[in-house]
Image (cartoon, helix red, strand yellow):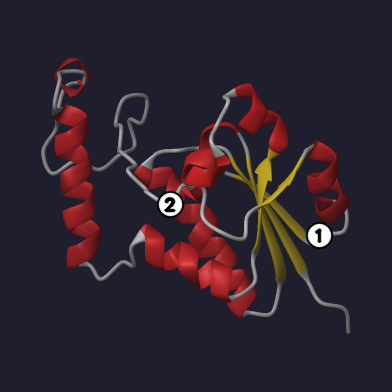
Amino acid sequence: MTEKKLAIIATKGTLDWAYPPFILASTAAALGYETEIFFTFYGLQLLKKNLNLQVSSLGNPGMPMPMPVPVLLQALPGMQSMMTMMMKQKMKSKGVASLEELRELCVEAEVKLVACQMTVDLFEMDTKEFIDGVEYGGAATFFEFAGESDICLYI
């Protein structure tokens, strides 16, 4: 029996969008899938050693809030930091693993983490800020794996 494969494209760099690729990849790896996450554009933030990600409710009307907050108020200075703090507290109180823990689970489970070289070059990112073990490649690198995958997700 051939090993199943999961390919994920991670494009978002906010706290709330950082969880899905790491949760899905670590779960798939635990289930025996060969797994790869291709990080591009803002998703490259998830590879930084220092994860200082924020939550933004702007443009995300489905975000559950403890109390209704008009969009205009959400744009005020300090609201993003406050909402990030609230989200982190909520996750901690519910026993949700931190992003660092989830990312480490992926590394330990040999999930292949691939940074989009074109985007790294485009944004002139310093790869020394990335965690160890990151591989670099372009769209062709992604398609080489994704073309043989059983499941492909765009997050």
Residue sitting at the far top: 72
Q: Is residue 32 left or right of residue 138?
A: left
Q: Position of residue 75 (x, y in %)?
A: 21, 18
Identify the secondary structure beneath mark 1: loop
| Among the 4 quarters of the image, the one containing residue 101 | bottom left
Tag 2 and tag 1, C-beta contact below 8 Å: no
| Quadrant that contains the C terminus | top right
Residue sitting at the far left: 67
Circle 1 sits on which residue?
Answer: 149
**Above or below, comparing residue 19 to residue 33 in the picture:** above
Rendered residue at 81%/59% (across/down)? 149
Circle 2 sits on which residue?
Answer: 49
Label 2 packing within 10 angstroms: few (<14), some (14-19), many (20+): few
Q: Which of these two is toward me, 81 or 28? A: 81
| Quadrant that contains the N terminus | bottom right
Q: Amino acid at mark 2?
A: Lys
**Above or below, comparing residue 92 to residue 58 in the picture:** below
Q: Earlier in the sequence, mark 2 or mark 1?
A: 2
Q: Position of residue 87 (x, y in %)?
A: 22, 49
Q: How many angstroms separate mark 2 from mark 1 (CA)?
A: 28 Å
Q: Position of residue 65 (x, y in %)?
A: 19, 41
Q: Position of residue 42 (x, y in %)?
A: 52, 33
Q: Which of these two is toward me, 25 or 106? A: 106
